[in-house]
Amino acid sequence: PKVEFSSTRVEQGAVVTVLLTGFLDGPEPSVETDLSLAQFCDVPGGKAAFIGVHYNREPGDYTVRVTCGRRPFDRGQMQT
């Protein structure tokens, strides 16, 4: 599987896209972050999750964790 982020830095009030491609059928992938609730939906070529950043979210570094089956992909820190 391959995980791509539209950006590693996002402004308050904006959205970052997480694109997951190259995975086999199996358990539904998941995304976890303290920025906002998000879940994957089907898009051409894979799945995408959209993480919104509230306009008054405290600036800082936030971890985004994507899990596909038993394999976790830590993006590390996303800056707001």
Image (tube, rainbow, N blue to C red):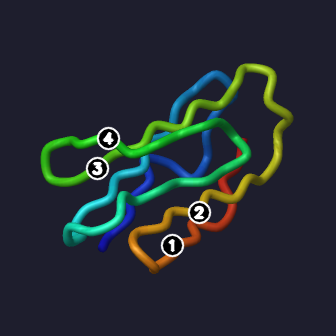
Q: Nearer the viewer, residue 44 or 77?
A: 44
> Image quadrant for the N terminus?
bottom left
Left or right of 43 on screen, residue 72: right
Label 4 CA crowd tier, 10 Å (few <14, some 14–19, many 20+): some
Q: Which mark is residue 47?
A: 3
Disc 3 from disc 2: Cα separation: 15 Å
Q: Are marks 4 and 3 in contact (CB under 8 Å)?
A: yes
Which element type, helix, strand or loop, lies under badge 1?
strand
Q: Nearer the viewer, residue 61 or 35?
A: 35
Find residue 31 and report its horizontal and vertical position in percent: 52, 54
Find residue 18 and report its horizontal and vertical position in percent: 42, 50
Disc 2 from disc 4: Cα separation: 16 Å
Left or right of 3 on screen, residue 46: left
Identify the residue under disc 4: 41
Disc 4 from disc 3: Cα separation: 5 Å
Amino acid type at image mark 1: Phe
